[in-house]
Amino acid sequence: MPLAMLRQGETACIKEIVGGRTARGKLTDMGFVSGKTVKIHRSSGGPLIVGLGDNRIALGRGMAHKIIVNTGGCEN
Amino acid sequence: MALNKRERKNTELKVALAGNPNSGKTTMFNELTGSRQHVGNWPGVTVEKKTGRAFYQDYSLEVIDLPGTYSLGAYSEDEVVARDFLTAGDYDVVLNIINSANLDRNLYFTVQLLEMGVDLIAVLNMADEAEKKGIKIDKNKLSQMLGTPVVETVASRGRGIDNLLEQTVQNRNLTEASLKIDYGSEVEDLISEVVEMLKQYDFSQQINQRWAAVKLIEHDPEAVKLLEREVGASKAKKIKSLIAERELKAEDDFDNIIIDKKYEFINKIIEESVKRPAADAELENVSDKIDAVVTNKYLGIPIFMAVMWAIFKFTFTLGDPLIGYIETFFEIAGGWIGTQLLEIGVAPLISSFITDGIIGGVGSVLVFIPNIFLLFLAIGVLEDSGYMSRAAYVMDKVMSKLGLHGKSFIPMIVGFGCNVPGVMATRTLDSKRDRIISILINPLMSCSARLPVYVVFAGALFSSHASTVVFSLYIMGIVMAVIMAGIFNKILFKGERSHFVMELPPYRFPTLKGVIIHMWEKVGAFLKKAGTIIFSVVVLIWVLANLPLGVEYASAESFIGQFGQLVAPIFAPLGFGSWQAASSLVFGILAKEVVVGTLGVVYAAGEGGLRTALLANFTPLAAYSFLTMVLLYTPCIATLGAIKSETQSWKWTLITASYLFVLAWITAFVIYQGGMLLGIGV
């Protein structure tokens, strides 16, 4: 499911990044790649705040829809 | 001679600093060059490359600080600056500044540079933060796997700098082979084929062929453009269709495969060279705790408003008494110098030049040093703490209604200091539409140069409500910016939506050194401005007030008086049709402080100084209307220049200059005529 649909506090594992070249490029540059664990720190209507390792990244809803995840953390 | 020249060349190095935002590049730059260079704790503080000089032993290093970037992809103007510089290759060594506590993401950029064949030193900066988190990095292993030297530093404390300089000069002739990542047989076969095809063309001798092939396979637009330019569209198409044909057969898009392999490579490096304590990821850190409150759905905007109010109060409450002292100083000094000059028999004209022109004009602007000092101190703390990007996050709610996103708010906050860096800060926005709208509304953010005008008028006419009146002007600026952004959003290029991704860096305690450097830099710029442009304009006005010869000083018959009378009718319906007010506004376009400077010169003849003169010539309503005009009208030439160079277009520059004048006129008209009808402040 898309990252945007997770609830605050939930953790997920990135499966793939979809969408256009620019959006995908920007996301992978910031470290959103398959196999990484993400945590939703804030989801309250506006942009999400996502934890990716020690980084905190504000992510527009549109962008968060381009990140496809499996719920629960990554295996390792 | 020839020998000398070579010797000189050997000791001169061109070194570029490149890396992710928030990796400490600018701090490193300051540490290396000793430059007074401001560092902000929000992404993209360096939007233009900056040059400084460092010296080590017999070597002289030209150091170039590039804007922060996450990759060579370059999605925004500031990143393009960095990418173009790095691909052009006009440097000896790149110091790739890496945030040690955030190695995996930072290495993505490092790997890209190494693949391109850039000679670089991997600088593991912020080593102390990594240590604090218990992260241990095996430098030798890392160096071996990357195939490039690795140095550890803590730029903020000057740790490891000498070693870095030593390594830099020792490795100035790095000519190691570029890094090769194994992209898997499918991609590797294609790479070899594309390389073979590229070899037929001369241009490929000057570039890294493997890297070019990878870029083409990734469909990198810049690489495709280069190929088309060098070999022509039809030959380029042959290569492109080969890639497209293979991609159809492949299990995934090639760019996805390449990205995944790069990260796989990085993961392997991390696995073998980095040890980190288990399970600390779950630990909520201090930044998260602060963010839980600061970015709260309901509290976010009120907290931001409270922060703005606190900055404002800080600037005024602390600044006001200091202004009083400086004012008294100038009054006493002016009077004393006046009598001294009279006693030693200096010609009245020269005496008038010094007391009316310089002290009355420049002095009336210099009085505001405390305010400017405090305002920039506050903005400096705000920027360095990391709160700026949270403010942008919180304001996304408002901005998104205008078709912009939260990141567009950062240039607006910068604009409160000065609109020139505000306009430049729009480079971090990746869509052209967002940039143009942000540039168009930036001058509505009330900059520090307008502050003196507000304070003089508010002090003279609204004594008990002075700070409320001034704060209302700041709010009016924001409200107008919001309204205008909404209007531009409707009438300008619709549709084009940009992607909102913004890093929220960890909060940091602003260092005293950093904040003082920032503040001193701004106050220095203000003093320089006072000594150059404000001084020149004030002198010009004083001259115009004395001409034609024999005219009474600063009378309606003087040149400045005649000029003012010519323009005054435009402003008469706004409640300030005097020639003094009109000419101050016209000259204020040169620099907004000049409004006060001009009034200081032309009213200097009167008894009791500028305040008394304003009290006699303005009603409170007319004064508020005048301040509205000062807030909103045509920006100063420096800002217009910045708009021209950022938009590369006279059209947008002229649109900004004129729409703001019209907006200012209409708003002041409504306020003045409305106030007259209601009988407020007349």
Image (spheres, coloured by chain):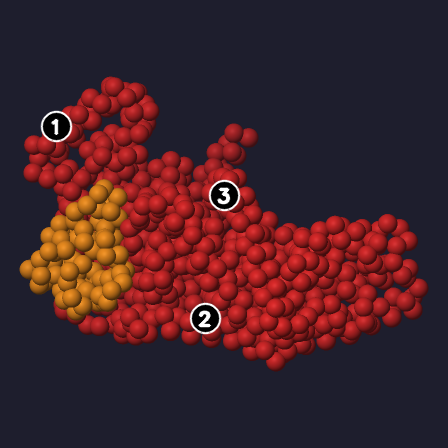
Chain colours: A orange, B red
Chain of the residue that carries numbered disc 3 in the rendered image: B
Quadrant housing residue B239: top left
The quarter holding residue A5 reads bottom left
Q: Are marks 1 and 2 in contact (CB under 8 Å)?
A: no
Residue B652: which numbered mark, if any? 3
Considering every residue shown, the one lying at the far front of the view is B677
* Labels 1 and 2 within one chain: yes
Q: Residue at x 42, y 74 (%)?
A: B306
Quarter that holds the N terminus of chain B: top right
Name the subunit of mark 1.
B
Q: In whole angstroms, how far apart are the C-alphas of marks 1 and 2?
A: 57 Å
Residue B593 point in image, percent of width and height: 64, 60
Q: Secondary structure at mark 3?
A: helix
Camera-nearest residue between B611 and B20: B611
Quarter of the image where the C terminus of chain B is located: bottom right
Q: Which amino acid type is shown beneath numbered disc 3?
A: Trp
* Residue at (59, 56) in percent of width and height: B665
The answer to whether B257 appears left or right of B455 in the picture is left
Q: Position of residue A4 (x, y in %)?
A: 18, 59
Image disc number at residue B308: 2
Element type at mark 2? helix
Whether labels 2 and 3 share one chain: yes
Looking at the picture, tell me which residue is in the foreground, B46 or B18.
Answer: B46
Is residue B173 at all visible to an observer of this figure?
no
Question: Pointer 1: what residue?
Answer: B245
- Of tags 1 and 2, the one toward the viewer is 2
In the rendered structure, which amino acid carries the disc numbered 2?
Met
Counting from the top left corner in percent of width and height, residue B664 is at 57, 56
